[in-house]
Amino acid sequence: MARSAGEFDSWYADRIESPVADELVRRVLGLPPDLQSTSLLGGAGLDEVVAALDLRTGQVLVDLACGRGGYGLEIARRSGCRVVGIDFSAVAIEHARRRARALGLADRADFRVGELTATGLSTASADAVLVVDSIQFAEPLPDALRECRRVVRPGGRVLVTCWEAVDADDERLSPRLRQLDLGRQLPRAGFVDVEVADRPVWRLAEQALWQEALTIDAGDDPAMRSMQDEAQRVLATFDRLRRVLATARVPHSAPASLP
């Protein structure tokens, strides 16, 4: 079932008011102390993403489905690049703008409301696109991958972190996750040099996060209660998913979009 922007607005509003949830995620996943994450990419994964993107001062990164902007802002801080964050939650976007100002990065950060399938950005306007743990929400998925390709300049890169089913026919898993097969889907969207690599160490960190979340007294904290509900769902099917990092490139000589 699709999740609406309104649902995510409420989820982000709860998370913003929950220092317990943020502290737990940063500590267990090994994230920088001022990075506000709403995904599950940990510190080691972030280091790997920064290295793979290999961005330089003045280049443009599109952080697609950016949430509160934590990853894009951290990458901008480390690399000197400019970040354009897109998310369909107006609450998340407003918070990302506030964080950019607080971190002194407002001159290199632009956060806008938009969709995975319709960013509103110009063709070939970015050096790279990053999608952290959100590509499964795209409807339809092929349109989101084509949109990534459209906004990246020839020779630019796309990086996607997500989960894929060990068995795509396993009906115990969400249809959103069962649809993912980036090794096939990225080439169909026009990308080349596609690599999809398992990251089991990231998965172990996630397991530790979910397990510790269940030990905390959530009290009247709606974000922690939501995290505990999600922990129970995730741990019930934990071994049926694999954690992946997908990287790909837009061909140097190809047109900016496919027919």
Image (tube, rainbow, N blue to C red):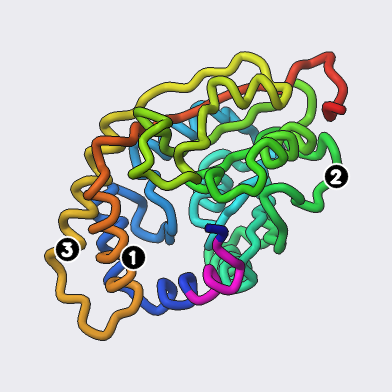
Q: Which amino acid lies under the numbered mark 3 shown in the image of this protein? A: Leu
Tell me the kind of residue under disc 2.
Answer: Ser
Which residue is the extreme one toward the bottom?
A: 220
Q: Is residue 240 above or below residue 19?
A: above
Question: Left or right of 147: which side holds 194?
Answer: left
| Residue 165 to residue 132: above or below | above
How far apart in space, not on screen, are marks 1 and 2 (Cα)?
34 Å
Q: Which of disc 2 and disc 3 is earlier in sequence?
A: 2
Which residue was labeled with disc 2? 122
Residue on which the image places disc 1: 22
Q: Which is nearer the eye, 29 or 254?
A: 254
Q: Is residue 105 left or right of residue 161?
A: right
Residue 259 lies in magenta, yes or no?
no
Label count reads 3
Percent of width and height locating residue 99:
54, 67
- Quadrant for the C terminus, please: top right
Residue picked out by circle 3? 214
How far apart are the alpha carbons under marks 1 and 3?
Answer: 15 Å
